[in-house]
Image (cartoon, rainbow, N blue to C red):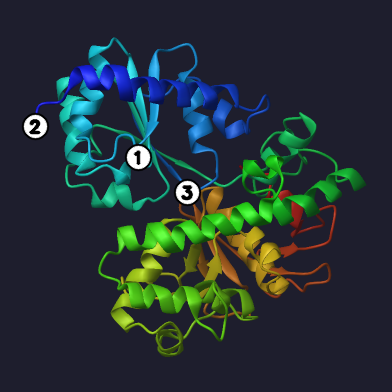
Amino acid sequence: MRKYNFHRMNTNILQTLVTAMQRRLAALPQRLRPFTTEFDELPKNLMLTGARGCGKSTFLLHHSQGRRLLYFSADNPKIIGEPLYDLVSSVFMLGYEGVIIDEIHYASNWSIHLKALYDDYPGKIIWISDSSSLVLRDGKADLSRRYVAIQMPLMSFREFLYLETGQIYPKYKLGDTILPTQPDAELLNHFLNYRSYGTRPFYQEKDFEARYMAIIDKILNNDIPFFLPSISENNLRVMRENPLRGRRAIIGTLANSSIPRVQVTSLCSDWGIGAEKLYQLLFVMESVDLLKIVKYPNDTKARSTGAKMLFADPCAYKVLNADQGTEREAYTVHCFSRAGYEINAMKDEKKGDYMITKDHVSQTLEVGGKNKNPKEADYVLRDNTDYPVGNAIPFWLMGMMW
């Protein structure tokens, strides 16, 4: 490893990074999503993952206040090509308590460097973040014993209400008889807005649809090629620019399908890739929180498209003007998975649409509109309703679980 030019770091790169961090700190919103403020103290060595735009940088910058930490993103052109160990060592030598490194996967051999930094600087703070859970799996060094992993979910309706009103409500637990709040007309209107654009805090900056589509483009153009380098540019071009489906052909199949199931043969034909590449692609798309593949219980096959395939963010259905019946299912899967449940599709749909499991207790769910029949399910989840009645739960209440 080459010797790092400490003086050049001090005079050129450092000031650029410091100035950029100061701009970010000055731009922090006054009202932060509750997930950010629920942590009183962060571990010294942290690996934060979550979907693009969910607020990871804001989370880390908020907790950096009052400490002498330096924030930078590993995809900053000023530092691309610089060995991570040398760069961070120079920061520590300047007296900083620690570093915050965003988009960590862009740093070459990042996991090996982080292991060495952890071992060589035991008193320093090292917080890293990335938009893909693959960083935990693909790191060449074992970081699980050194870095605490935190997964940042998309925003709940409960968090959205706080950003809109300043009121923090208690979390709802399935089976609670006391509601966290009353479903008046104002709350139900907020819920309609939440389902359109409320899952990511950047909605406050307006242009949610444009920003969401920019995230889709970055996933297609940057994340997928990075985590799946074996996929050819020709494959990506077919997925992005299929003339029959428009520029975003890869998501057209999901957006235009009224039944959230996929056929491997037809997808391979549509997207111009082989079956093995398709399975790899879907795995990466799920790891970056673009898709959610819902399997049947006990389906442990690595090569599986599951029983149902949904957008991980239910707002995608509004942005893309997609099938709203499927949006109901995506919203349900979104709520229960973010609230810590394992969720599976039911093979016998006479008994319900989904099975949820938490703390070794399984229950069944039926999903539909305000007049949906519960069939044999433990709970029926009804859209366009206000109060729970018997085992019927209104949609807005599910959004209060985290």
Which residue bears the numbered disc 1? 77
- Position in image of residue 311 (x %, y %): 56, 65
Disc 2 element: loop
| Type of amino acid under label 2 | Arg
Q: Residue 227 sits in which quadrant?
A: bottom left
Looking at the rendered structure, the kind of residue marked 1 is: Pro
**Residue density around tag 3, few if under 14, some if 14–19, many if 20 or more, within 10 Å:** few
In the picture, residue 224 is in which quadrant? bottom left
Mark identifier at residue 2: 2
Q: Earlier in the sequence, mark 1 or mark 3?
A: 1
Structural crowding at the residue carrying mark 1, measured as other residues with C-alpha within 10 Å and reported as few (<14), some (14–19) or many (≥20): few
Kind of residue at badge 3: Asp
How far from the left and from the top, in percent, is residue 329?
64, 67
Residue 271 visible from this viewpoint = yes
Which is more toward the observer, 118 or 319? 319
Q: Is residue 85 above or below residue 137?
A: above
SS assignment at label 3: loop
Q: Is residue 367 above or below residue 73?
A: below
- Label 1 near label 2: C-beta < 8 Å? no
Q: CA distance from mark 1 to mark 3?
A: 46 Å
Numbered circle sitting on residue 359: 3
At mark 1, the secondary structure is: loop
Q: Residue at x 57, y 26 (%)?
A: 37
